[in-house]
Amino acid sequence: RMALAEVAAGAGGGGSSEAGAVAGPPAAAPVPAPAEEEEDERPEGVGLEETLQAIVEGRRRKGLLRRLTVRGPGSTDFASNDYLGLAMDPQLAWDIDAEMATVRQEQQKLTGEVGLGSTGSRLLTGNSQYYEATEEMLSEFHGSESALIFNSGFDANFALFAYLPQPGDIVVFDELVHASVREGLRAGRAACRPFAHNDVAALRRALASVSAAGSAPQPSRRGNLIVALETVYSMDGHCAPLAEMCDVAEEFGASVIVDEAHGTGVFGAGGRGWASQLGVEQRLFCRVHTFGKGVGAHGAAILGPRVLYDYLVNYARPLIYSTSLPLHSIVSIRCAYATMRASAEPRQRHLRELIEIFQARLLRLPPGSALSSPSPIQGIIVPGNEHCMQVAGFLQRRGFHVLAIRSPTVPAGTERLRIILHYHNTKEQVNALMDAIEEVMALPSDTSLASRL
């Protein structure tokens, strides 16, 4: 997640590369590839398999090779996005099984069949009354005219930003927005410009700049202004100052789109999210709520005006050309929302207590190493990829499932331990983790941690 220079997305969905250009200054350029792609080595004159091998080996030499891992048995979870503990709630699992049995019985009575897969995209055979009833439940719960379910949060964000902005529109986005938003912008047709993270004044300057650029020589042809934000940022845990940003956006007639991936469940009455907690839901054009984090299930939904629903059904290719979620996923969403609605407040209260304990213990660490966050996402800066991995390994050997976030995922020098607090964590576990962190952070950075327990 690097800060970008002024950028404009290239053509997408049939548009031309000129269609998204801003008239006059500021100058536009293609959205750059992620920093990690720019650093990959690409040899010439060899076959495809050899090219891939060279790229993978180059990343391995730099200590950046990703690999799939499995959480160790018995380790304490400080890494997952299961903020409310719903993904491991046994009662919710039983509720899902019971609802599945009921729905299958009804299905068999009506059709004589008991299905498993969805069999096709929503526009073909993958839709159902149960699917649409779930969307109605979501729109009612979140206070929107419509809800449209996507297979994942990445699909939802990509679809929004690749296909919603029209030629001539301008998207102003927080420099730390998720990769799914960036990829949508790269594929789309709008001109784009970042602004400094969570900086209201920087947002105002960016909107003023692009508004001035679009006002001449043909002000009547200026496109729409769109502001793209996250409500809670996944690497820092920062919460967006949404009320102030809506104030600025409204001054310029800009529509605000937010990603509530890390706010759903954690904030708001019944887990409705950060925008709901601040009372600004109706000031937003649309919201993306995902189900794989605080909700403990899978998938996502875009909530907004009915016309947005109709537009996306016609133009969002990730929806049109993907097999829809199977029945079990939709049942899981409905049951998880019922559990969240009934139990969010006590779960949120326990989370806040854990956050207060964690933040108080951070004051004991060296200055500049702790990130301040009101959310369950906490961070401790451990500069240097290798050292950060060593510290994470030390904590894992102590039985704490804590992961290192390396550059270029975060800027070099800000590598960190990403620590997630959950409803299923106890105060004793948080204090034990902080004891271990204080111990390892007190060691010289050149100390070998491989053999220490």
Image: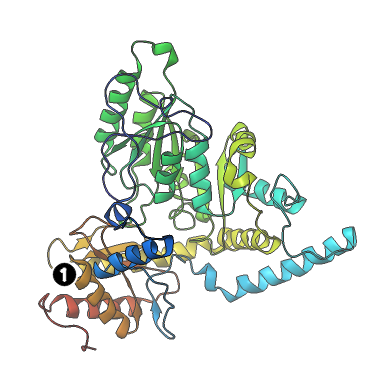
Is 81 located above or below residue 390 in the figure?
above
Q: Which of the two residues, 140 or 234, is positioned nearer the viewer here?
A: 234
Disc 1 is placed on an element classified as loop
Q: Is residue 144 left or right of residue 42?
A: right
> In which quadrant will I find the C terminus?
bottom left
Q: Which of the two residues, 91 or 128, is positioned nearer the viewer here?
A: 128
Q: Quadrant of residue 48?
A: bottom left
Q: Is residue 437 left or right of residue 316?
A: left
Instruction: Single out the residue that lies furthest toward the front.
Output: 45
Badge 1: few (under 14), some or many (20 or more) residues near its Cα, within 10 Å? Answer: some
Residue linked to disc 1: 365
Q: Residue at x 21, y 88 (%)?
A: 452
Q: Residue at x 23, y 55 (%)?
A: 411
Q: Residue at x 31, y 19 (%)?
A: 213
Q: Could you tell me if residue 405 is visible in this image? A: no
Q: Residue at x 39, y 11 (%)?
A: 218
Is 78 located above or below residue 266 in the figure?
below
Residue type, numbered disc 1 = Leu
Q: Which of the two residues, 43 or 271, is positioned nearer the viewer here?
A: 43
Q: Position of residue 129 (x, y in %)?
A: 76, 50
Q: Position of residue 310 (x, y in %)?
A: 64, 35
